[in-house]
Amino acid sequence: MIKACLFDLDGVVVDTAVYHYKAWKKLANSLGFDFTEVQNEELKGVSRMDSLKKILAWGGVSKSGEEMNALATQKNEWYVDMIQQIKPGEELPGAKEFLQKIREAGYKTALGSASKNAGIILNNLGITNLFDAIIDGNSVTHSKPDPEVFLKGAEAVGVQPNESVVFEDAVAGIEAAIAGGMYSVGIGQPEVLTKADIVVPGLYDMSIEKLKSLEKI
Ligand code: B16
Ligand code: MG
């Protein structure tokens, strides 16, 4: 029986990808190259340092560990400046309503995000209280597709992995759910999220009936 819902943040609850893209683009430009929106898709759900490594490889640029730390810090400063402007109501369509609905129905909720800035974003949206547990980039050592972030989320709300559903927009996140032995709901396109149990375009299209239908899979 499904007892908990575990949510990725960026691309599921809020669209912060646009801010990540702007900040990474500014960094790449400062190093003398650029990358496309299509390449940016590959950064979704990927940790800050792994994202930087990919971007430097695209630009054919090599940096020392110390320089990479400084570049990641610079990108994060630009990114944090942007997310400070996030206001209540900027959640993706249906996200807040679905969270409220499942909590009223008795399901536990947890956040499972790669972002170290998840706390600021939830606070600015005013929806921190809709999560029973928050597991983010500060509390894990392994990035998705490793299941750590979701296993910790299920554990924090006292539910078994096979009683949990993961909501994810990134392929690596769906793989993490599968590796953790959880149900998965892809948020996006079925052609991309081929391994998810079901795919919906957004949380506005989710319902308790669809959640329960996963149990028959
Ligand atoms: P930060 P998610 C991920 O969030 C983003 O999709 C990814 O683009 C970002 O690099 C990562 O968080 C780390 O974010 O730099 O804020 O720690 O989709 O796992 O909620
Ligand atoms: Mg995501």
Image: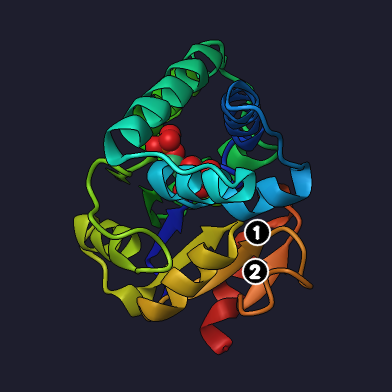
Q: Compare residues 7 and 50 and report the one nearer the observer.
A: 50
Q: Compare residues 102 and 192 and report the one nearer the observer.
A: 192
The quadrant in which residue 26 appears is top right
Residue 177's place in the image compared with 154, above or below, is: below
The x, y position of residue 115, in whole percent, is: 40, 40
Residue 62's place in the image compared with 159, above or below, is: above
**Residue under numbered circle 2:** 210
The quadrant in which residue 91 appears is top right
**Type of the residue with mark 2:** Lys
**Type of the residue with mark 1:** Ser
Determine the secondary structure under disc 2.
Answer: helix
Image marks 2 and 1: residues in contact by CB distance under 8 Å: yes
Q: Residues within 10 Å of mark 1 (few under 14, many from 20)?
A: few
Query: Looking at the image, how many numbered discs can be counted on the residues?
Result: 2
**Residue under numbered circle 1:** 207
The quadrant in which residue 136 appears is top left
